[in-house]
Amino acid sequence: MKRIAFLLVALMACQLIIAQNEFKFGPVIGVNTTSIKPADLTDLEGLKIRAQEGQLGYRVGMFARIPMGNLYLQPSLILRTATAQYTFEDLGSPNNIQFKDENYLNFDVPAVLGAKLLFLRLHAGPVASIRLNTNSKAFDRDGYERTFDRVNWGLQLGTGVDIWKFALDVNYQMPIVAGQDGVRVNGQDYVLNSEKGQLMISLGFAL
């Protein structure tokens, strides 16, 4: 009886290991922080423009996990939103403070290489971030022009755990090369902010 129980446990363990090494793909959703800090706008102090703390953004897309021996390659296609809020002080009326939002839509393509340590997955790899759209109520005014690089490159580091068909990942994404992100006011360029590191939490489901 003990031998039968041992064989059943061993068989279940083997099936679990095989299942973990299978090709997986499916949808993924999550949230991410927005990397805007008031200190980023020191060049715009004379214009009385200041940034507030960044707000949560959202992530949706698809992921795949490709087994490579003891390692795995996990590419993803992610649409990422972000929102930043700015305050504008009316120079003619210093007590009149206006709050304006700026919304971003980015297309992220990370491709991380990972390995499993006990029940945790550890991974790292490059990510291309493509700015698809910027809807700015903050700088939608005469004499203001938003400037930014269309494509930025970054590095993604993270960990994750698999529970049944669900894959929970916590990642930190940082820029490799800080891209241009600013505003042109009456022909004069000002540095607005470069995207800093951001924390991301994602939940995937393997189909």
Image: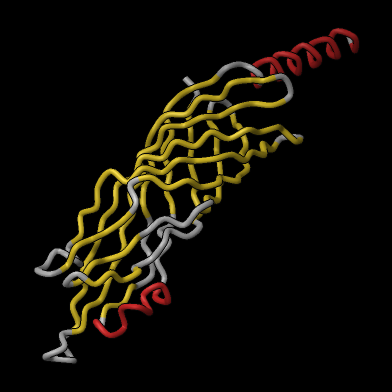
Looking at this view, name the residue that lies furthest to the right: 2
Total numbered labels: 0
Residue visible at 47% across and 19% down? 207
Q: Is residue 89 shown above or below 166?
A: below
Residue 103, position as x, y percentages in the image: 26, 55
Q: Is residue 175 shown above or below 161?
A: below
Residue visible at 50% across and 23% down? 206
107 and 56: which one is in front?
Answer: 107
Q: Say left or right for 67 vs 129.
A: right
Residue 42, position as x, y percentages in the image: 38, 79
Quadrant of the image containing the N terminus: top right
Q: Tell me which corner region of the image, top left, top right, bottom left or bottom right, holds residue 34.
A: bottom left
Q: Say left or right for 21 vs 79.
A: right
Q: Say left or right for 144 vs 125.
A: left
Q: Is residue 204 shown above or below 182?
A: above
Residue visible at 49% across and 41% down? 127
82 and 31: which one is in front?
Answer: 82
Residue 12, position as x, y percentages in the image: 73, 15
Q: Is residue 5 shown above or below 171?
A: above
Residue visible at 14% across and 64% down? 140
180 and 206: which one is in front?
Answer: 180
How did the renderer colour the structure?
Answer: secondary structure
Residue 144, position as x, y percentages in the image: 17, 67
Looking at this view, name the residue that lies furthest to the left: 142
